[in-house]
Image (cartoon, helix red, strand yellow):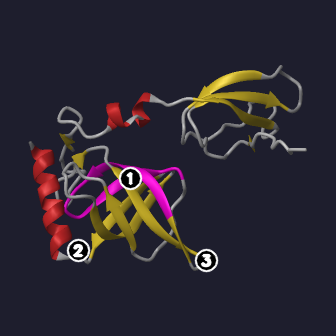
Amino acid sequence: MSETSSPRVYGPGELAPFSGVYRVSHLTGHRPTHDAVIIRGEELPACRTCGGNVRFVVVDSLSHVTHEWDFAGPHGLLVSTCRRDARDLRRSRRYEVDLPVTIQLQTRGDLKAVDGCTSNISEGGMNATFDTLVSNLEPMEIAITVPDENGALFASARLRHVNGQKHGFEFVRLDRRAKRKLQLTLRWLRR
């Protein structure tokens, strides 16, 4: 006899793990169960009437166009220079671009790979979005899939700030090969 697993139930304050249709149940019964579209990474809200007594179950996982490589991946039209003004006095020009990125986190002695996507990159660092909160204070290894045939850009980086799922990293101790690959990538982004 096979045992079937019940679907995972999510509550207010958790981040939506998938984009798609969710079944929403109000535990106080003030409203019938209904479906809602929720985008991956959004914080699941509390109900105005029920407060935290609301639950979410994924009914149908769907891909959102902004999470699709074909639409959000690197493309000449999607890359732009971030505007610089007095509020943005950085050492290096940032380029807005969506590139797949993987970081290696050390948790309880084990290495864990976490996938995300850059929102911008510069000679000094990058901003990236991850479904998992990253809180390591030690430098971590990062692999950025760059638009060339020679493989990923590997760098060591330190977490500088976190705002929800958005994480800011500063590159540290780049070897000559990583610096060269980063320079070539930025040159490609300037085109």
The span from disc 2 to disc 1 (Cα, nearest Å) is 18 Å
Q: Between disc 2 and disc 1, whose residue precedes?
A: 1
Q: Which residue is mark 3?
A: 108
Q: Is residue 50 visible?
A: yes
**Residue 182 forms part of the magenta stretch:** no
With 90 as the anchor, is 38 left or right in this view? right
Identify which residue is drawn at 51% across, 51% down.
Answer: 164
**Residue 123 forms part of the magenta stretch:** yes
Which quadrant is the N terminus positioned in?
A: top right
Which of the pair 87/68 is nearer the observer? 68
Which quadrant is the C terminus positioned in?
A: top left
| Type of amino acid under label 3 | Arg
Q: Between disc 3 and disc 1, whose residue precedes?
A: 3
Residue 67 pos. (x, y %): 43, 36
Identify which residue is drawn at 76% across, 39% down.
Answer: 7
Q: Which residues are magenta?
A: 113-131
Q: Is residue 23 above or below residue 42?
A: above
How packed is label 2: few (under 14 Cα within 10 Å), some, or many (20 or more)? some
| Type of amino acid under label 1 | Ala
Marking on residue 174: 2
Marking on residue 146: none
Marking on residue 128: 1
* Helix, strand or loop for disc 2: loop
Q: Nearer the viewer, mark 3 or mark 1?
A: 3
Looking at the rendering, which quadrant does residue 157 occupy? bottom left
Which of the pair 46/16 is nearer the observer? 16
Residue 155 pos. (x, y %): 29, 68
How packed is label 1: few (under 14 Cα within 10 Å), some, or many (20 or more)? many
